[in-house]
Amino acid sequence: MQPIQQSKVYNAAMWSGLLLSIYLVVRFFFVVSSANSLILNILTIFLTIGIPFVAYYLGKDFKKRSNEELTYRNFYSHGFFMFFYASLILALVEYIYYGFINPDFINEQYNTLVQNLEVLKQTMPDASSLEEVVNSSPIPTASQMAMQNIWMYSFAGIIISLINAYILNKKH
């Protein structure tokens, strides 16, 4: 078998990233809808726990569709770029949601955080320093939230891909 070209890894990562982004977008809508629902909160937790398993499945599918020799680097690159591409699509959806569909969502979440800190401060006097940090920080914009999630999912992709690449490469 021949080693795979890196461009094929990136192309496969784009398609896998599209599939992962669908999963992450569904999860995102569960997150924003779960503010007052215990059942949706529980489903959101399960969807969050499922992210590494979905990534493993997509890596396994990449391995199955490839007729070339795959190395740890190929599996890792596929996994990382899959998360990166998925986070770009998710960021676009989040930006549209936070900026246009529900522009008050971030402010409502911030106000809830401040209210919860007031309650926490009554039971834990040390929480006042946390309250000072929150009050001195500006409320993030829709674009800042989207950028933050690109970084967050890319970092999660690094960690998850390290593990998944090891497992997928070991199963040769």
Image (tube, rainbow, N blue to C red):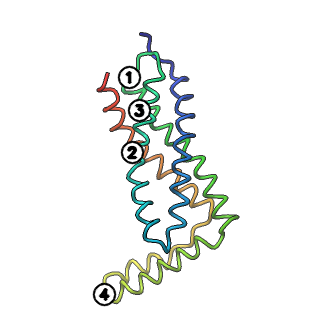
The span from disc 4 to disc 1 (Cα, nearest Å) is 53 Å
Point out the frontmost of discs 1 and 2.
Answer: 2
**At 51% from the left edge and 23% from the top edge, which residue is drawn?**
6
Apparent side of residue 66 relative to residue 167 in the rendered image (left or right): right
At numbered mark 4, what does the secondary structure look like: helix, strand or loop? Answer: helix
**At 53% from the left edge and 29% from the top edge, which residue is drawn?**
12
Q: Which mark is residue 52?
A: 2
Could you tell which of marks 4 and 3 lies nearer the N-terminus? 3
Q: Which residue is mark 1?
A: 71
**At 61% from the left edge and 66% from the top edge, which residue is drawn?**
141
Relative depth, front residue between 9 and 25:
25
In the rendered image, residue 134, in percent from the top left (x then y), is placed at 47, 76
Q: Which residue is mark 4?
A: 123
At numbered mark 2, what does the secondary structure look like: helix, strand or loop? Answer: helix
Q: Amino acid at mark 1?
A: Thr
Determine the residue located farthest toward the front in the rendered image. Answer: 39
In the rendered image, residue 113, in percent from the top left (x then y), is placed at 47, 77
Vertical placement of residue 156 versus 108, above or below: above
Answer with the quarter of the image where residue 57 lies. Answer: top left
At numbered mark 3, what does the secondary structure look like: helix, strand or loop? Answer: helix
Q: Which residue is mark 3?
A: 76
The span from disc 2 to disc 4 (Cα, nearest Å) is 36 Å
Could you tell which of marks 1 and 2 lies nearer the N-terminus? 2
Determine the residue located farthest toward the bottom in the rendered image. Answer: 122
Apparent side of residue 93 relative to residue 115 in the rendered image (left or right): right
Could you tell which of marks 4 and 1 lies nearer the N-terminus? 1
Q: Amino acid at mark 4?
A: Thr
The span from disc 3 to disc 2 (Cα, nearest Å) is 13 Å
CB within 8 Å, label 3 to label 1: no
In the rendered image, residue 16, in percent from the top left (x then y), is placed at 52, 36
